[in-house]
Image (cartoon, rainbow, N blue to C red):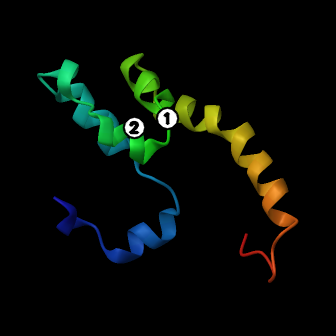
């Protein structure tokens, strides 16, 4: 129930809350059908799905993203028209 969270929570977190997704998968009685093709479209590939199915925790998943995110930030920096917000 997201009514417990203020809009400020989401603005300050500045990250996807994987805790909810991991918990939903953990308690799902039908893990075989938990993910559908739309999830792949949202995630961009099957890696996140595989990580969740393998039981990786949020920290491990986020660490696996770090190299690609840093590479993206380096490339992005070349094309910024205005000062970066980070």
Instruction: Kindly state the secondary structure of the residue where label 2 is placed.
Output: helix
Relative vertical location of residue 55 with respect to residue 6 in this rendering, above or below: above
Q: Is residue 76 left or right of residue 57?
A: right
Residue 86 percent coordinates (x, y): 73, 69
Which residue matches tag 1? Answer: 45
Q: Quadrant of residue 53?
A: top left
Residue 47 percent coordinates (x, y): 50, 28
**Residue at the far left in the pictured view:** 29
Residue 40 disc label: 2
Q: Quadrant of the N terminus?
A: bottom left
Mark 2 closeness class: few <14, some 14–19, many ≥20 residues within 10 Å: some
Give the CA separation, mark 2 to mark 1: 5 Å
Badges 2 and 1: C-beta atoms under 8 Å apart?
A: yes
Q: Quadrant of residue 60?
A: top right
- Name the residue: 81% across, 74% down: 80
**Residue at the far right in the pictured view:** 78
Instruction: Kindly state the secondary structure of the residue where label 1 is placed.
Output: loop
């Amino acid at each position: 129930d997201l009514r417990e969270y203020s809009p400020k929570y989401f603005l300050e977190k500045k990250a996807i809350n994987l805790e909810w997704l991991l918990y939903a998968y953990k308690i799902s009685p039908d893990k075989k059908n938990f993910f559908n093709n739309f999830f792949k479209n949202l995630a961009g590939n099957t890696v996140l799905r595989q990580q969740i199915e393998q039981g990786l925790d949020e920290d491990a998943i986020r660490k696996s993203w770090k190299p690609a995110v840093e590479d993206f930030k380096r490339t992005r920096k070349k094309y910024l028209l205005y000062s970066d917000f980070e």
